[in-house]
Image: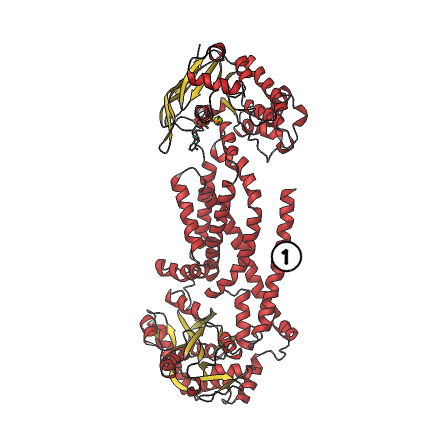
Amino acid sequence: MTTRVEMKNVHKQYGNNDVIKGVDLQVQDNEVVVLIGPSGAGKSTVLRMINGLETTTSGSIMIDNVDIAKPGVNINAIREKIGMVFQHFNLFPNMSVRDNITLAPIELGVMDKATANAEADKLLATVGLSEKADEMPNSLSGGQKQRVAIARALAMKPEIMLFDEPTSALDPEMVGDVLAVMRKLARQGMTMVIVTHEMGFAKEVADRVVFFGDGHILEQGTPEQIFDHPNHPRLQTFLNQVLNA
Amino acid sequence: MKRSWFWTALVATFITVVAFLAPQSVHAAEKTYTIGTDVTFAPFEFANKDNQYVGIDIDLMNAIAKTEGFKVNIKPLGFNAAVQALEAKQIDGVIAGMSITPERQAKFAMSDPYYTSGVVGAAKTGAHIKSLNDLRGKKVAVKTGTASADYVNSIKKKYNLTVVTFDDSNNVYQDVITGNSAACFEDQPVMQYGIATGLALKIFTKPAESGTYGIAIKKGEPELLAKVNAGIKKLKANGQYDKIVAKYLGTGSNKSQKEKNDSTQETDHSFLGLLKTNSGTLMGGLGETLLLTVVAIVCATVVGILIGLLGVIPNKLAQGTATTFIYIFRGLPLMVLALLIYTGIPSLTGTKIPAFVAGIVTLTLNEGAYTAAFVKGGIGSVDKGQMEAARSLGLPWSKAMRRVILPQGIKIMIPSFINQFIITLKDTSILSVIGLLELTQTGKIIIARNMEGFKIWTMVALMYLIIITLLTWLSNWVQKKVNA
Ligand SMILES: Nc1ncnc2c1ncn2[C@@H]1O[C@H](COP(=O)(O)OP(=O)(O)OP(=O)(O)O)[C@@H](O)[C@H]1O
Ligand SMILES: [Mg+2]
């Protein structure tokens, strides 16, 4: 087993407000880790720390044994191998679907234009949106936007994928398509860290489920342990609330 | 992080601006003196109907240069701008009906007196004002910085006068004609010229001796001062001086003044007649206005975008610089900034700045600050998630800014840009304070000669409106293209 992500005693403060209070989290190669927990627990903050979108107040974060906060470390190079998918898609509205996908590979010089376009068409095929390549993002439905966003994140051929509530902003009938794409990625052995409220999906794809509460990891384990035999009283309350909602 | 493209662009712009500001090469070979003068002080200096500067001061200065064997380049800058240019040592002297005062003697080398001024008061024709006593407790109008202003201040206690001041003689007269002020005071020949040109005013006092006119010379030019003094002496002795004065004033009667005026003025004072005679001059002013506008828009847009970008770089120093720039140059009134740059910078550095360059720098800083503010705001209004998505792909900040954020921000900014272009066009009129011969200044100069304020300002206003309409059409067309 190779450790891809290793967070050690990570803290984060906004002003005087302690938000992350000493988190230790490891993600192994090919592992799918799902983060769950109540609103405001710090799931997004922890996820965004992994690719440096959020800074830490103390503690360390290693990606493939490189401390991302160390001076002189090229954070852009690290981000190239970590794809990220956002709750609100964040597609670039000023360019076509295809250009959204090819922007990074072309700008960063890892592919020429023709290769990048061919790759984009392949990715669009895998997310089932081949015919949308020349559309502008604003003409797509939410589910289609999110699948384009996944294709865009995959364009740099990342080794790790981060998802922050990828289906929360979608109409219920769109959720299935997006989860199907993610399921496919998980089967292919992609290392994934997913924040989600879709407990059924978590149970199905997760190798490990991590429960956050109030800036701490309160419990973690296999889906069976977490969903069928929860120990921590707050996890029990949380599961009661989401499953009976 | 690689942000080299940005810094390269920034440095390139600064080099361009510095090169632009660098002193123009000065002719040193032949002794040519630059003498500034007013543009609206008929009959001492004014533009005649052919837009040539004529008048007692102009002819006198040329005659002095001729007898004393030097060359003179007379620059019609406007009174305040000329005095400020002399203070900043941008020019060698000023001849503009300047009274010799202790303050001026302290600042400049004043020549021997060449004219004894007599201040007269004038009231609206038909008003019952026959002497200073009739003015008790009333309002009177004068031009700033003139001998008449000094005179009125010396008697205002005695007659309990309220004094209002204007920068332009024509505004002084109009204040009386419209009834705001009961009377105005001005040097006799100046007042006589205006009345002979058709102002509905009548003189009700005898000339009160109030001082003498001298030519102001830059300190540290004793050679020029000596030549000017010798010239005045010679011309007075050989009768040439009297001839020059008579050429513009006649024998002193209203009738002979009228005859003299006819040789410098347009005869047809109808709207169309005035338009015909002055269209060339006005178009010249319009050309200068357009040139100023276009150059200023280009410079202010470049500077504004760069400063606006500086304001969004994730770096405290860069953001502080941008905020300070915007704070200072948006806060300073344009006129103050223009005078500060035109007269202040040469006093500090000792290098001259041509008025046009000073004008462009002024507009660039002021309009650039406004542009920077909305560029910064426009970029700031692009959803934060856009930058995060771009950065999460591994794009450096500069590439994310250029490819993702800016294209979206610029769309938001377009209406602000159009608005700013129109404001820039209008703001050029303020540069008349540093003597730039743009449209507004051209209007003032024509009015100083023919006293037709309402008609000429109507023409000027129409010209601005036409240009602004064209600019708006063009902008809307561009906006449609961009949004298509
Ligand atoms: N920019 C910020 N400034 C101040 N506080 C913040 C900021 N971002 C997040 N927080 C706070 O940090 C805490 C954790 O937020 P985070 O977004 O990580 O929670 P979450 O677990 O993702 O919740 P949700 O399920 O609602 O998305 C919250 O209390 C939030 O208010
Ligand atoms: Mg969240």
- Give, as a three-letter code, the residue at label 1: Leu
In the displayed image of the protein, which residue is found farthest to the right?
A131
Count of numbered badges drawn on the protein: 1
Residue B52 visible in this rendered orientation of the protein: no
- Identify whether B132 is placed above or below A39: below
- Identify whether B91 is placed above or below B309: below
Residue B346 visible in this rendered orientation of the protein: yes
Residue A244 x %, y %: 54, 19
Residue A212 x %, y %: 43, 20
Query: Which residue is identified by label 1?
Result: B470
Residue B248 x %, y %: 51, 83
Residue B128 x %, y %: 50, 88
- Depth check: give the residue in front, A196 or B412: A196
From the image, which quarter does the C terminus of chain B lie in? Answer: top right
Helix or strand or loop: what does disc 1 sit on?
Answer: helix
Location of residue B140 by image quarter: bottom left
Q: Chain of mark 1?
A: B
Name the residue at 44% across, 74% down: B165
- Depth check: give the residue in front, B265 or B370: B370
